[in-house]
């Protein structure tokens, strides 16, 4: 064996060791993300129960997506919310704000104690995202606005030659708003590969099933035809979410759209897939039962 | 006389300012020609964003740009911009309180013969009722330039409405002290005050001069800022002249006249006449014909002034 060949094999062995290490590290992180999601879900339910107001189903359905973004993907500095190079997050489906507030507080953007003021008189924790709260970029709540805003931010990044990414989570029912498609058209026109849209495809909206109210399918084809690179994932599988989000943009020069298949009310058996839980508030008894279920969470994924 | 459209003056000012400040961005919605922004797009393509015929997206993108530190100026048709995308203006711009300047071009009845779909006669009313939104109507090219020069310095939302056509100068370029949010007294008088905004200020001033020759001493005030309103100047004029006539290219509901009425009815009740377009789809015609029909030209204003004076308590 000559020296060159020796070096080659040595490199391969070393790479394998490093990769195995990082793989283990990743799996450890995935386990932590799962645990974090369960914690955040408990906090969401406590918050909604305390306030007597909130959007329970949708907040639970986006939690694994937001946890993966905030704890695994996004480049942010909670102590410096306006840091110029930060990745941006826009919650287009603003009614799921409980999940965002709980995560921001947990990350240290503001004191967790403040969560108790949610929807209380004079609180800055309004029932839809409020950019007076550290970590919240823009006020949303009227549906179909977030993607245009995200296009604007992503466009600014391109103009300023900055490397940050823009992530936005949209509801599936929200896509019935025509403004989304204006934004979708422009994102690909501007070649915004720094923009990653995630659709929380829980298939329910306030009145019932999306396909009954106003059919969205074939959803993937719609986005593809608007010039986006599209991928579908299990929106409760942290590992899948992590791998895909880590590898964005999926294609240079194109915006990325992730259809995250989710379950509205995910994590609590009696809330899951129940249309009435769009904005039902858990009673004290229901809260206790939900906390008990969530405390036992170990499995994951859409069937977990 | 040197007649220039306000939008033309705004474009020139923005080119001047944007050459020194890379964060100034102009956005249009297939409206660059109508907005006289073609030259901006040609000279500063890196600071120009064409969004196409999609007003909601236009405003949302501008809000996103502002949130990332840019200084966006939207220039699009007032009729569509203030109706189609009003929710984006309310939520994305005003509620988020980001630095977006919304320029409504071809405001009022600029597109007279094209019908109600193209008239912007409710824009002041809508914009004025939105928290954090300021409302400006410059009277001529000089006031337009001064206004933009000032607005570029702050980081808050504003709506600027201008017309389509070239307008005569109200102000003298070399001898004009512009103070943002303050009314300008263009002519002193003791009998009545005519308050006007935007491109109707010229009409108010002409009427004031003719009335002077007829022995009626009218004070003429030009107001470029409907919100915030220079309450001090209006109350002072009410005290001085005892009656007020307002003139605007807007619905009689919710515009300058309403703003003045809201103020006077609570602080100093003097006889008031609101001149504007009535609550109906406006008659077909060129702006001049339409103004004449509704008594919003110089002759109409003179007639209304005389009528109001007869009601004034001596």
Image (cartoon, helix red, strand yellow):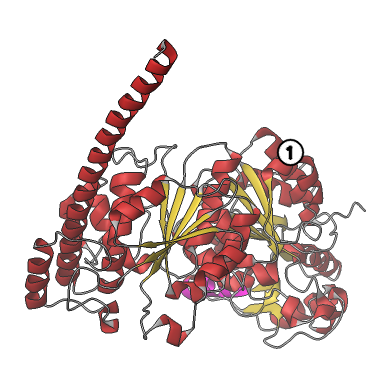
The residue lying furthest to the front in this view is A1
Q: Which residue is mark 1?
A: B16
Please indicate, yes or no, whether residue B135 appears anywhere in the rendered image: no
Q: Nearer the viewer, residue B207 or A123?
A: A123
**Count of numbered marks:** 1
Residue beneath the point at 28% across and 61% down: A63
Tell me which corner region of the image, top left, top right, bottom left or bottom right, holds residue B294. bottom right
- The quadrant the C terminus of chain B occupies is bottom right
Residue B187 x %, y %: 74, 58
Q: Is residue B132 left or right of residue B288?
A: left
Element type at mark 1: helix
Q: Nearer the viewer, residue B306 or B204?
A: B204
Residue B106 x %, y %: 76, 66
Point out the stretch of residues depicted in magenta. B255-266
Tell me which corner region of the image, top left, top right, bottom left or bottom right, holds residue B256. bottom right
Does A199 appear above or below B41?
below
Q: Nearer the viewer, residue B112 or B191?
A: B112
Q: Nearer the viewer, residue A211 or B93?
A: A211
Residue A208 x %, y %: 36, 85
The residue lying furthest to the right in this view is B1
- The chain under label 1 reads B
Majority secondary structure of magenta residues: helix
Tell me which corner region of the image, top left, top right, bottom left or bottom right, holds residue B248. bottom right
**Residue A105 covered by magenta stretch:** no
Residue B164 x %, y %: 80, 64
Does B201 appear above or below A239?
below
Does A75 appear above or below A120?
above
């Amino acid at each position: 064996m000559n020296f060159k060949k020796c070096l080659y094999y040595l490199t391969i062995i070393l790479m394998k060791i490093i990769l195995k290490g990082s793989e283990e590290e990743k799996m450890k992180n995935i386990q932590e993300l799962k645990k974090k999601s369960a914690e955040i879900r408990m906090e969401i339910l406590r918050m909604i129960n305390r306030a007597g107001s909130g959007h329970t189903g949708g907040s639970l359905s986006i939690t694994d997506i937001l946890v993966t973004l905030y704890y695994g993907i996004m480049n942010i500095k909670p102590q410096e919310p306006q840091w110029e190079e930060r990745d941006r997050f826009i919650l287009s489906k603003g009614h799921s704000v409980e999940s965002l507030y709980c995560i921001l507080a947990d990350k240290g953007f503001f004191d967790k104690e403040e969560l108790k003021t949610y929807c209380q008189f004079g609180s800055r924790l309004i029932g839809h995202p409020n950019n007076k709260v550290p970590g919240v970029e823009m006020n949303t709540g009227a549906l179909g606005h977030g993607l245009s805003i995200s296009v604007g931010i992503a466009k600014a990044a391109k103009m300023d030659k900055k490397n940050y990414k823009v992530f936005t989570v949209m509801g599936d029912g929200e896509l019935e708003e025509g403004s989304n498609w204006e934004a979708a058209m422009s994102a690909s026109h501007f070649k915004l590969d720094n923009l990653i849209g995630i659709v929380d495809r829980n298939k329910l909206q306030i009145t019932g099933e999306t396909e009954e109210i106003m059919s969205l399918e074939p959803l993937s084809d719609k986005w593809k035809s608007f010039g986006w690179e599209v991928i579908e994932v299990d929106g409760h599988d942290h590992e899948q979410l992590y791998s895909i989000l880590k590898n964005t943009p999926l294609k240079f020069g194109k915006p990325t759209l992730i259809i995250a298949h989710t379950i509205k009310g995910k994590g609590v058996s009696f809330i899951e897939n129940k249309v009435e839980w769009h904005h039902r508030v858990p009673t004290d008894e229901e809260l206790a039962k939900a906390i008990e279920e969530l405390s036992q969470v170990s499995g994951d994924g859409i069937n977990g | 006389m040197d007649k220039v459209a306000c939008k033309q003056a705004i474009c020139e000012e923005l080119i001047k300012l944007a050459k020194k400040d890379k964060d100034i961005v102009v956005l249009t919605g297939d409206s660059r020609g109508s907005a006289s922004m073609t030259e901006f797009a040609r000279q500063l393509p890196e600071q120009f964003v064409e969004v196409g015929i999609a007003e909601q997206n236009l405003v949302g993108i501008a809000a996103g740009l502002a949130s990332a530190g840019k200084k966006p100026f939207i220039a699009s048709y007032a009729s569509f911009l203030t109706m189609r995308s009003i929710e984006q203006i309310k939520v994305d711009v005003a509620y988020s309180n980001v630095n977006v300047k919304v320029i409504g071009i071809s405001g009022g009845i600029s597109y007279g013969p094209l019908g109600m779909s193209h008239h912007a006669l409710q824009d002041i009313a809508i914009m004025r009722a939105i928290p954090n939104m300021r409302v400006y109507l410059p009277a001529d090219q000089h006031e337009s330039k001064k206004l933009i020069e000032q607005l570029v310095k702050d980081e808050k939302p504003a709506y600027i409405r201008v017309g389509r056509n070239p307008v005569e100068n109200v102000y003298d370029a070399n001898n004009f002290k512009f103070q943002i949010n303050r009314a300008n007294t263009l002519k002193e008088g003791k009998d009545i005050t005519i308050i006007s905004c935007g491109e109707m200020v010229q009409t108010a001033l002409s009427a004031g001069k003719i009335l002077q020759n007829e022995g009626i001493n009218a004070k003429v005030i030009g107001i470029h800022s409907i919100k915030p309103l220079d309450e001090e100047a209006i109350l002072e004029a009410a005290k001085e002249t005892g009656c007020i006539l307002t003139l605007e290219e807007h619905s009689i509901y919710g515009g300058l006249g309403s703003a003045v009425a809201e103020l006077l009815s609570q602080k100093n009740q003097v006889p008031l006449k609101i001149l504007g377009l009535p609550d109906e789809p406006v008659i077909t015609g060129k702006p001049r014909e339409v103004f004449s029909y509704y008594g919003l030209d110089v002759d109409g204003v003179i007639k209304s002034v005389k009528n109001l004076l007869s009601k004034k308590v001596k």
